[in-house]
Image (spheres, rainbow, N blue to C red):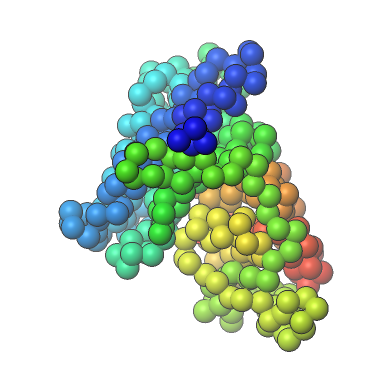
Amino acid sequence: MKDLITLEEYIIQAQNKFPGATGELSQLLRDIGLAAKIISREVNKAGITNILGYEGSENVHGENVKKLDLFANEQLISALSRSNITCMVISEENEGIVRLSGEAGKYIVYMDPLDGSSNIDVSVSIGSIFSIYMRDDNNKKLSEEEALKPGTEQVAAGYVVYGSSTVLAYTTGMGVHLFTLDPSLGEFILNDSDVKIPEYGNIYSADEGSYNFWDPGLKKYVKYCQEIDADTQRPYKARYIGCMAADVHRTLLQGGIFMYPDSTKYPNGKLRLMYECNPLSFIIEQAGGLATDGNQRIMEIQPASLHECTPIYIGSKNNIEKFKEFFVEE
Ligand code: P6P
C-alpha cells in the first residue's frame, strides 16, 4: 500500500516543490481527474445505460454528436466550474467560448471532451484531451482573441484514454506523469513519473485509406516504412486506432510516428490545433519527442481561430527526422 501514490497525492507533492504555488493549478488538475473518473464509469457501461448512439445535433465541425460526447462535455465543464479557477473553456462541442465562474478564474482551458467518438459504439478506445493557459490580465474583459495563444504558452496539458484500462497523462512542463485508474479504489494510481518516448520506433500510424489524397513526399515516406530492411526494423508495423489520444499514447510508450496530414480531402489537416495537437505535442516534447506540421513546431503555430485545424506529424525524434527527409518543405 505504501508504494501507491494517487493522482491527488502526486499533484500536491509536485506543488509543494514550488513554495509560491497557490494550489489553483493543482485544484484544476484534480477537478479534471474527477471528471475523468465519472466519464470512465459511463464509458465502461455505455452499452447498458443506452448512452450510445447519436444525440442528433452536429458540432462546430459538422460532425454528428454522440450522447457520450455531450455527457463528457457537461462533466468536464461542471468539474471546471467547481472552483473560481477557470474563466473560460473552449470545447470541440461548443462554437464560442464558454464563460465560467463569473469569469474570475486565471486559467483558460481548451478541451476535446471525447476524442474518437466514432469508436464508442464498437467498444474501441476513446479519450479526453485538455490544454491549459494562464490569462494575461484578469481585469480585461474575456474575449476569444485572448485565448488565441501559441502552444508554447501552455502551462499544463494532458489526456485520458478510456481503453482496456483508463489512463491519465499530464505535464506541467516538468516531465510527463502517467496514472492508471483503479476502479476498485476510484483512484488514479501513479505508473511512471517521468515518461520518456523511445528515440526510435518501428510503428507508423496513419489512415492509409486516404493514401490517394496525400502529397507525393508522404507517399514516399510510407513506402519507406514498408520496405524490408532488418537494420532499421523495417517493414514497420502499421497501427491506427482512430482516436488521436490513444494513438499518441501508444506512440509515447512504444515509439514511432503518428501522422494526420493535410490532403486534397483536408487541405489544412483534420485535427484541431488548440485542443488536440498542442496538448499532445506538449506531452510528446516533454517526453523527448517531436511534433511538427511539416514545416514548423506545432506549438509555435500562432492560432487565428479557436477551432482551426493543422496537419501533424508527431512521435519519436529519429522517426520524425527521417520523415522530414521525405517531406518537401512547402
Ligand atoms: P479519421 C477523432 O475524430 C479524431 O479527431 C482523432 O482523434 C483521430 O485521430 C482522427 O479524428 C480520426 O480521423 O479521418 O481517421 O476518422
The answer to whether 130 appears left or right of 288 in the picture is left
Q: What residue is at 55 percent from the left and 72 percent from the top?
A: 239
- Where residue 257 sits, quadrant-wise, is bottom right
Name the outermost residue toward the bottom.
Answer: 228
Instruction: Please say if 53 is above or below 90.
Output: below
The answer to whether 258 appears left or right of 275 in the picture is right
Q: What residue is at 78 percent from the left and 72 percent from the top?
A: 326
Q: Quadrant of the N terminus?
A: top left
Q: What residue is at 37 percent from the left and 59 percent from the top?
A: 117
Name the outermost residue toward the front.
Answer: 1
Foreground pick, 6 / 106: 6
Q: What residue is at 32 percent from the left and 68 percent from the top?
A: 122
- Where residue 212 sits, quadrant-wise, is bottom right
Mark yes or no: residue 318 visible: yes
Percent across and percent down for residue 294 are 72, 61
Percent across and percent down for residue 265 are 53, 71
The answer to whether 160 appears left or right of 249 in the picture is left
Foreground pick, 312 / 124: 124
Q: Quadrant of the C terminus?
A: bottom right
Instruction: Please say if 199 is above or below 216.
Output: above
Foreground pick, 155 / 269: 155
Percent across and percent down for residue 47 are 22, 60
The answer to whether 254 appears left or right of 26 in the picture is right
Mark yes or no: residue 92 visible: no
Percent across and percent down for residue 203 are 64, 70
